[in-house]
Image (cartoon, coloured by chain):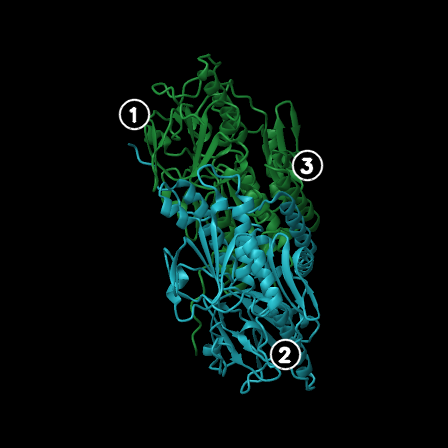
Chain colours: A cyan, B green
Amino acid sequence: MATARPQVVILGAGFGGIETAKALRSAPVDVTLIDRQNHHCFQPLLYQVATAALSPADIAWPIRHILRGQTNATVLMAEITAVDRECHCVMLRDTDPMRYDILVVATVATHAYFCHDEWAEFAPGLKQIVDATRIRRCILLSFEQAELTHDDAERQRLLTFAIVGGGATGVEMAGAIAEIARLTLARDFRRIDPRTARIVLLEAGSRILPTLPPALSDYARRTLTRMGVEVLTSTPVIGCDRGGVSVHDRRIDASTIIWAAGVRASPAAEWLGAPADRAGRIIVGPDLSLREHPEIFVIGDTAAVQGPDGQPVPGIAPAAKQMGRYVAGVIRSGLTSQTHAPFRYRHAGTLATIGRRAAVVDLGAFKLTGFAGWLFWSVAHIYFLIGLRYRFLVAFMWLWDFLTFQRGARLITEVAPQPPLKAR
Amino acid sequence: MATARPQVVILGAGFGGIETAKALRSAPVDVTLIDRQNHHCFQPLLYQVATAALSPADIAWPIRHILRGQTNATVLMAEITAVDRECHCVMLRDTDPMRYDILVVATVATHAYFCHDEWAEFAPGLKQIVDATRIRRCILLSFEQAELTHDDAERQRLLTFAIVGGGATGVEMAGAIAEIARLTLARDFRRIDPRTARIVLLEAGSRILPTLPPALSDYARRTLTRMGVEVLTSTPVIGCDRGGVSVHDRRIDASTIIWAAGVRASPAAEWLGAPADRAGRIIVGPDLSLREHPEIFVIGDTAAVQGPDGQPVPGIAPAAKQMGRYVAGVIRSGLTSQTHAPFRYRHAGTLATIGRRAAVVDLGAFKLTGFAGWLFWSVAHIYFLIGLRYRFLVAFMWLWDFLTFQRGARLITEVAPQPPLKAR
């Protein structure tokens, strides 16, 4: 391979980064994709790992396996510590810097606690595989400890689950926890009745699923309420601690608090010295490059881009993929000094599942709710999984669990090892 | 439920504990099964989790789910801190003590480092789910770091895997790592060739698989050698550290060391004040009870029992299950003051798999090697998995991976979170 080929370095192997790399498959460039994880995570199903329906490996695939057949692509598992824009170098921890001709910043967002980072300890968010196994451990341990305790107030606290944020993730988590309590665990305990668990969904705004039409928000609220979830809208959280959450007029004692309220872009803006919006997303030009550094592109969660309707492009997988494909096109055009039309986002639709028989689907003119919505949601998500093996496995597990009301991954792992037993 | 029913408390939800609880299903007793984990782990396939072929949830099931239909059984997830034999109480961390009329000690064994516990840090053993995910992380990270390094000696060290102990676990791990390097990862890297990895199996005795007939040991050795594993017999390890292992005449630099050399019983002997053998296993009477405490039974890995041939009963799943069924029978007889014949171990056979097309099977008169052995091994292990769901899933994954040379669970999880990126 000639060393004169342009070096394209992509930071982050989320939906945007993977799509950019794949779209450069036949381009005369060398692609290096850098991520600190070895896997690409299918985030839309992460809540199913957190609620014990799927295993981590069902929705996360080795990045280098995804790109194994693409000979112009190298994958490095390394932590990015800085970017030197003058030298065109990405600094990596514990290994040599990586030179680039073209840089694509595709780092993914993290949780935002609205200036209350101390809440992170008590209210984990859901962005990575480790977050999901942590939340799974919290939920399952709460039921185990409730079975052990002899204190009524503590038992009630252990069986209370507070979900902060009424977007798609919050709605999906609330519905799934309600099903765990009412269906999956119903017969598994002897001293407690898991069906008495209290699940509270807290939303600061006036309705849940605010990006959907009001009729669908209403439907989601009614469905959750029927499943036994308390939906509290116009209820901003003003405090989180080990014992529970505080809202303006009351206190909710809860052992499990799940944060689904906000996202913040990766610190790439600070690190590139580029102007950013309030959420930390980098302001990019019409071709998604930086104004003063046309060799640096920013895509996905890290880019502040406006859609054709003047609204910001949402931080969802289809948007990141569209940006990835677009930037790959700009790079290919640039190699032959052609110009390229500005990026234009096309919104395909919004989907959120509520439970084992309900979902809301908004494809603009075409809207679905209930079982039809749930079927559409299931088929769409299986279709987007990578690889036949996983499509088949996940379809089988969903069908099985649907028929049996079970969940196949109810593991509490990483409990601290037992100290030596003492003679008495 | 009348409170006058005898309280049977079982410590540990391994094969022995689960079997005892199940065999007491229709007995007029209340059963309480206590384990510090929430899951029962199918240990014979743990090496497949460590080598990324299966996910933890494929071989570990919630204990309370296994016993959900058994109304006389209660499951508690709690850590046992001591036993008070005079008061007939089991002490539990953070919750009330548990009174028993009959106690069944079914705690599982842990690794033995032969008075070198400091080796544990560098050479993890394989007994629990967390051990398996730790070893999986070690193996996969070694290849990732080898791809990053520019130092030839370090690369060679990163690509060297030392397995200490030539029993079934050591042979299975060595074979599986050889397949990962030669087949699974062959096309996934750009800077290294995973096929150059060095896999060394170190056995102190004169042959591997010493409990099998010499002809089968020979077959296993030849097969491993053909797969590229260096099999070193009569080679006791005299040191383990971060850089590798030392044997009498040389040093093997290795980034991954896996301990499969010895087991030690749980500390139950010390804690019951009962006489034990050198491996810490409690000396029991012919009915598996303690001489001075006929209400305390000890089974599985924790019991020192002789088979009909005068040899110690091996620490394998079928032996633990036989003891569990036997003790349940003794308990039932005791309720009607009947006597019971002494425990008699029946050895069904010994199986070990070597790779994707070879295994050794010794059923006494009936012996198998090669592909036929592998098929027998696969069918036997799928049969013993709990639940149709898992039998089907594992069979599907094995078939798929057999046809594609892949492994479905190549995840490195629990990497330390990335610190904030710095501007430069």
Residue B375 circle label: 3
Q: Amino acid at mark 2?
A: Ala
Secondary structure beneath disc 3? helix
Mark 2 crowd level (few <14, some 14–19, many ≥20, 10 Å Cα): few
Residue that label 2 marks: A4
Q: In this orientation, which residue lies closer to the viewer: A63 or A188? A: A188
Give me the C-alpha separation between circle 1 and circle 3.
51 Å
Q: Can the viewer see residue B253 in this picture?
A: no
Please state the horizontal and vertical placement of residue B68, each as a whole percent of the image: 53, 36
* Labels 1 and 3: the sequence-earlier one: 1
Label 2: state its secondary structure: loop
Q: Position of residue A366 (x, y in %)?
A: 71, 67
| Residue A278 placement (x, y as % from top left) | 47, 78
Between the C-alphas of marks 1 and 2, the distance is 81 Å
Chain letter belonging to callout 1: B
Which residue is pictured at 65% across the width and 53% down the height?
A: A390
How far apart are the alpha carbons under marks 3 and 2?
A: 52 Å
Closest to the observer, A182 or B86? A182
Residue at image location 69% in from the left, 57% down from the top: A372
Q: Element at badge 1?
A: loop
In what quadrant of the picture does the N terminus of chain B appear?
Answer: top left
Q: Across the whole image, how many numbered discs are drawn on residues? A: 3
Q: Tell me which chain the residue with mark 3 is part of.
A: B
Query: Hey, what amino acid is under mark 3?
Result: Leu
Residue receiving disc 1:
B86
Disc 1 vs disc 2: Cβ atoms closer than 8 Å? no
Q: Quadrant of the C terminus of chain B?
A: bottom left
Identified at 47% across, 35% down, the residue is B13
Amino acid beneath label 1: Glu
